[in-house]
Amino acid sequence: MKVGVVGVGHGKFGRRSDATVQELAFEAFRAAMEDVKNLERKDIDSVIIGSSPEYHKQRSLPGVITEYIGMNDKPTWLTEAACASSSAALRSGYMAVKSGLHDVVLVLGVQKMTELNTAEIQSLMGRVGDVQWESIYGTTFPGYYALYANKHMDTYGTTGEQLARVAVKSHHYGAQNPYALFQKEITLERAMKSPMVADPLRVFDCCANADGAVALIITNDKLAKKYHDTPVWIDGLGSASAPISVLRRPDMTSIPSAVAAGKEAYKMAKVKPKDIQVADVHDCFTIAEILAYEDLGFAKKGQGGKFIDDKECYIGGKTPVNVDGGLKSKGHPVGATGASQTTEIVKQLRGDCGKRQVKGAEIGLTHNVGGIGQYCFVHVYKR
Amino acid sequence: MKVGVVGVGHGKFGRRSDATVQELAFEAFRAAMEDVKNLERKDIDSVIIGSSPEYHKQRSLPGVITEYIGMNDKPTWLTEAACASSSAALRSGYMAVKSGLHDVVLVLGVQKMTELNTAEIQSLMGRVGDVQWESIYGTTFPGYYALYANKHMDTYGTTGEQLARVAVKSHHYGAQNPYALFQKEITLERAMKSPMVADPLRVFDCCANADGAVALIITNDKLAKKYHDTPVWIDGLGSASAPISVLRRPDMTSIPSAVAAGKEAYKMAKVKPKDIQVADVHDCFTIAEILAYEDLGFAKKGQGGKFIDDKECYIGGKTPVNVDGGLKSKGHPVGATGASQTTEIVKQLRGDCGKRQVKGAEIGLTHNVGGIGQYCFVHVYKR
């Protein structure tokens, strides 16, 4: 049995003080229902919510959301894997369909971060690192990724300019994405002169907290064509974990869970890195995108900086990456991010991306990292 | 393909200030590894954690736990469905094996509640109800269940004495369970004279917050006998949701998600309520157990009070229920509770329960309610 995505619905990312978390979920759900044909609520067997619950005053998100979107009495629960929560939901949805337990599953990534203020978010973020040994000393998320950046610079000569080029690319494509938080181009100079957050990461090296939701409808190959003319199949799934404690990482120039997850997904889909025609990777910081080029085998080890210099990750290059603007310009509503990546790849493989379209793309990939790399979920998709 | 439980490991429930959340998880994991044969860490393909993350200072529980128990680089994520979080994990583990994605999955329910004080827990608990319309007015968990109790008393004449009898039974069996928080008998008089919490629920009508962890190892029928002589099969799975808002419930004398989940599980397992020889149900409050008798079809509608009067839920009765002591005497570490129920049923069907053994039990059931009934997970097991 093949399992595929037949419907995608992407809500607007940003500071969404106009909507509660259940309203955000409904916005995405409605968009997904408009994306499919012949599908009614009663045809959906289960609702799997991807989210990080700690951000919300409302607990029991699956409870409040299934009620609000009119999906009672269907089974529902939440998956959490920090910033990869909705990729865990997609993996769960795949398993639900593949196992035969369900025919159609709604995967809903949702997060409302701006109920909290920046200091509260910063405190929460730090606690996805090891609390007992690390975050009690005041670690922050930019601080963790600065460790990666410094080590990569030190080992391979990667530069702040190369980091900034990643941000320039993200904003270039984000300017063309109506769902992105920041829809404007930036110059290399502006990025490089932006204030320092955690040396060497500057403001434009960091993605922004955001609110938003994304819905995916997945089903098996018997039903898929009924619901969409161009199903996009999930052909490869990879997932792995790595020590949460940076003390236990042998090497800070790579995310080992991403390397392992990538290998597993490639193997299952019977493809190689060079076969990937469009990819959405986890660029919570610009250095994370450079690590992804290497961890996924798009660039050789240590050559991630050159990969962006040579524009190999632009449309027209070897492997177009984050041509939806990435987390950097879309914003990063943590629970919705994985499903947002999937939406972009599904649209690319359908050929629906207009000016941002990678022509003739038939094989795509998503790479969603949780926390500081303690988990990674990679999916390979084919038209 | 059949999917079954081959290993169970139950940690001690209680105020566990001696252990961090990852240490609690390890205690249960080690016990499960001692319960199986021929199984090494490398044979386990994935770790699914059931927990409610909001109770812990440490976020990213799957990250910290997989590292601590030595399971890197295996895939991991967390499932959350309030008090039914580890039943959602079991359902996910079932799907993972049944889909063929994994052969062996570790399901780990874990919760450390006592990092917080009682007032903080009470506030968190209230927020698993509808925050926008209800919990802002100060709803509490006992308050929600008192609504059920009052309505059931009003409609069917159920009495405070019948509620208290449920507690007496729980403590009777809990006194024989070495993992229980309260291992002592209580008298009916003591229960009925205990202080009022939320009229008509008294102290002895309420389960206690606790810390604890439980591990389950599940696999397919090709491998099961290799790892345990007596695998216990998951033959029926049912899950459903209901409106989180009590305003939208048509009837407060029943939990509709439990009724629907029960029917689905019975149908899949091809059994009827009368076939269930031993059951573990969600008795967060004594009234919840009485509702469960009726919602699952052990007793007729409105006859739950009589069911306990007649001791039909004792060993020797029609359907022995919570002969491990239930949440009432074991304590209720929310994320671990579902897996704890499964452990009891697995041990009963193996015939390993000593004095508490239901003789010849071959078919068992677990019933795990999330929140105030917005979800329920029912599993039917066979030897």
Image (cartoon, coloured by chain):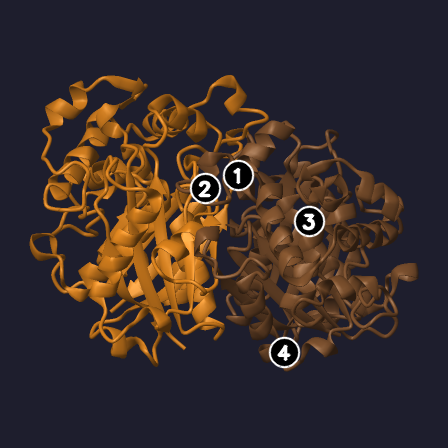
Chain colours: A orange, B brown
- Measure how far apart labels 2 and 4 are at the Cα level: 38 Å
Point out the tag, 4 or 3, that comes first from the N-terminus: 4
- Chain bearing mark 1: B
Residue count near mark 2 (Cα–Cα under 10 Å), binned few <14, some 14–19, many ≥20: some
- Residue type of the residue flagged with mark 2: Glu
Q: Secondary structure at mark 4?
A: helix
In percent of width and height, residue B64 lies at 57, 38
Image mark for residue B269: 4
- Chain bearing mark 3: B
Judging by the rendered image, the residue that carries numbered circle 2 is B134
Q: Residue at x 67, y 62 (%)?
A: B156
In the displayed structure image, the side of residue A30 where residue B101 appears, left or right:
right
Of the pair B62 and B177, the residue shown nearer to us: B177
- Residue type of the residue flagged with mark 1: Thr
In the displayed structure image, the side of residue B261 where residue A328 appears, left or right:
left
Q: Secondary structure at mark 1?
A: loop
Q: Secondary structure at mark 3?
A: loop
User: In the displayed image of the protein, which residue is found farthest to the left?
Assistant: A355
Of the pair A355 and A9, the residue shown nearer to us: A9
Point out the tag, 3 or 1, that comes first from the N-terminus: 1
Judging by the rendered image, the residue that carries numbered circle 1 is B139
Of the pair A290 and A21, the residue shown nearer to us: A21
- Residue type of the residue flagged with mark 3: Phe
Q: Are marks 4 and 1 on the same chain?
A: yes
- Judged by depth in the image, the label closer to the viewer, 4 or 3, is 3
- Judged by depth in the image, the label closer to the viewer, 4 or 1, is 1
